[in-house]
Image (cartoon, grey):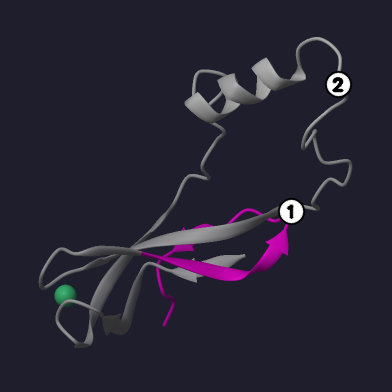
């Protein structure tokens, strides 16, 4: 998937359409086993008593590609999701004329 490097879209801070520069936003990862919730979950799984909210059996096909838009006037950043779940990677390209 291709996305233009510069676009004119709505800026929530300026409350009008301004020029934005786009950048590929890295997908977020799981925090691991150090968070309070996951530590509690492991404590519950210990010993007898079955399981509680185990791992999901269904695997999602692909991830939603996001782009980070930066307003050139106020430097405010905001995200935008491009399309739905795909395995294709998003790439930012300069607009051809
Ligand atoms: Zn702005």
Is label 2 within 8 A of ligand 1 (CB to nearest ligand atom)? no
Is label 1 within 8 A of ligand 1 (CB to nearest ligand atom)? no
Q: Which residues are magenta?
A: 79-97
Secondary element type, mark 2: loop
Does residue 87 appear left or right of residue 56 in this picture?
Answer: left
Task: Residue 88: name its quadrant.
Answer: bottom right
Tell me the quadrant of the picture where the N terminus can be found: bottom right
Residue 50 at x, y = what percent? 88, 24
Question: Which residue was labeled with disc 2?
Answer: 49
Q: Earlier in the sequence, mark 1 or mark 2?
A: 2
- Rounded to the nearest angstrom, the CA distance separating label 1 from label 2 is 39 Å
Q: Residues within 10 Å of mark 2 (few under 14, many from 20)?
A: few
Please tell me which residue is depicted at 44% across the width and 76% down the height of the picture. Answer: 96
Please tell me which residue is depicted at 67% across the width and 18% down the height of the picture. Answer: 42
Front-most of 34 and 86? Answer: 34
Residue 51 at x, y = what percent? 83, 28
Question: Which residue was labeled with disc 1?
Answer: 87
């Amino acid at each position: 998937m291709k996305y233009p490097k510069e676009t004119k879209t709505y800026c929530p801070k300026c409350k009008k359409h301004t020029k934005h520069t786009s950048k590929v936003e890295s997908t977020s990862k799981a925090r691991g086993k150090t968070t309070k919730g996951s530590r509690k979950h492991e404590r519950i799984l210990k010993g007898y008593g079955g399981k509680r909210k185990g791992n999901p059996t269904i695997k999602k096909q692909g991830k939603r590609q996001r782009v980070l838009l930066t307003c050139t006037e106020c430097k405010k950043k905001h995200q935008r999701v491009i399309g739905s779940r795909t395995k294709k990677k998003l790439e930012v390209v300069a607009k051809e004329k």
